[in-house]
């Protein structure tokens, strides 16, 4: 359950047939912005040889795009 000050993280990691890393999508959405409600599409980014799970802002584009929809639902307290 998220509260209005929470951050929703959407993370997807891809790998090739031999288990080699093929990129990561890791995007934050703030509760104050309705956790990114709506449709999103992000190109994967390749990580470094030292840390394939953390691509950084200057990472090369990866081989896939992930598309997803965020649909926040208020829960009764």
Image (cartoon, helix red, strand yellow):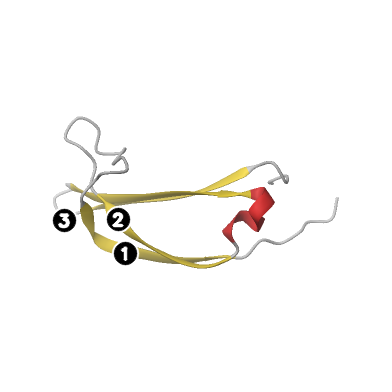
Dot 3 lies on which element?
loop
Badge nearest the viewer, 2 or 3:
2
Q: Cβ–Cβ below 8 Å for labels 2 and 3?
A: no
Spatial separation of the CA atoms under disc 2 and disc 3: 17 Å
Q: What residue is at 66 percent from the left and 61 percent from the top?
A: 72
Q: Cβ–Cβ below 8 Å for labels 2 and 1?
A: yes
Residue under label 3, please give it.
17
**Occupied quadrant, residue 48:** top left
- Label 3: few (<14), some (14–19) or many (≥20) C-alpha neighbours in 10 Å: few
Residue under label 2, please give it.
44
Residue under label 1, please give it.
65
Dot 1 lies on which element?
strand
Total count of labels: 3
Sequence order check, earlier mark of 1 and 3: 3
Q: Indicate whether 68 appears above or below 19.
A: below
Q: Indicate whether 12 appears above or below 72.
A: above
- Label 1: few (<14), some (14–19) or many (≥20) C-alpha neighbours in 10 Å: some
Q: What residue is at 69 percent from the left and 41 percent from the top?
A: 5
Q: Which of 66 and 28 is in front in this view?
A: 28
Dot 2 lies on which element?
strand
Sequence order check, earlier mark of 2 and 3: 3
Spatial separation of the CA atoms under disc 2 and disc 1: 6 Å
Answer with left or right where residue 4 lies relative to residue 64. Answer: right
């Amino acid at each position: 359950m998220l509260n209005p000050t929470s951050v929703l993280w959407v993370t997807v990691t891809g790998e090739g047939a031999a288990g080699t890393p093929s990129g990561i999508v890791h995007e934050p959405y703030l509760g104050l912005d309705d956790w990114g409600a709506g449709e999103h599409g992000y190109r994967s980014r390749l990580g470094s040889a030292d840390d394939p799970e953390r691509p950084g802002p200057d990472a090369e584009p990866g081989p896939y795009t992930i598309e997803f929809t965020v649909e926040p639902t208020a829960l009764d307290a």
